Image (spheres, rainbow, N blue to C red):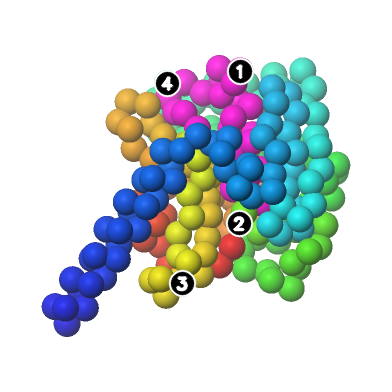
Amino acid sequence: MTIGKAAAGVVIAAMLAGCAGQMAGAPTAWYGAHNAVAPGPDRFVVCHAFGCARRTSVKLTRRDLNRLKRILRAGYRSPERERKAIGRAIAWAEKRVAPVVGSANDIGGLDMHNAGVAGQMDCLDEATNTTSVLLIAQSHGYLKHHRVASPVARGFFLDGRYPHATAVIVEKKSGSGYAVDSWPHGNGVEPDIMPLEAWFAASPASG
């Protein structure tokens, strides 16, 4: 039993180190590695159909950007409030792009039967799209307490779990990373936001 716990500890420590390494990279490097396109100040390419098999460009109007700003401004008083506001902002963004992308009925969680279906998203799509919205917000100065980091992945079968990826933000004051994980939920539902360590140690999942 002791050996098992020790071995598990070594695996977890190694994965946390790898996770930190991923997070330390430039967010834009994620796009080149995942068949995606980095966002501009008012436009981003939404990944869908699993693994960014399909890409749909969406332009945010001035009204959209003002809406995004208002949602995030509600969190200016503290990092905790800003994380809640980020959750609302991502839910809003998913609803905003749904008519263009055809993702209104995107199913959350494990739904491999929808692989390749336009408008359906796996964790790579979700991590990419969430990061794009956050990078747009950051470029306009809408984030006060956090910066956007590169998405990270866990699993790879090494620890008995399927691969899974998430967008990441880092609290500026503490340096703590937080997962912003839209994948478990359907379109327009606020993502799970939690300390990255807790996300990394969470139950098995496949994205």
Residue 46 in view: yes
Label located before the other in sequence (2 or 4): 4
Q: Residues within 10 Å of mark 4 (few under 14, many from 20)?
A: few
Q: Nearer the viewer, residue 20 or 131?
A: 20
* Residue appearing at x 69%, y 44% in the figure: 36
Query: What's the amino acid at mark 2?
Result: Cys
What range of the chain is rendered magenta?
125-148
**Circle nearer the viewer, 1 or 4:** 1
Provide the residue designation for mark 3.
157
Label located before the other in sequence (3 or 1): 1
- In the image, residue 118 sits, relative to residue 205, either above or below, namely above
* Residue appearing at x 39%, y 57% in the figure: 200
Provide the residue designation for mark 2.
123
Query: What's the amino acid at mark 1?
Result: His
Q: Which label is found at residue 77?
A: 4
Label located before the other in sequence (2 or 1): 2
Label located before the other in sequence (4 or 3): 4
* Residue appearing at x 71%, y 59% in the figure: 50
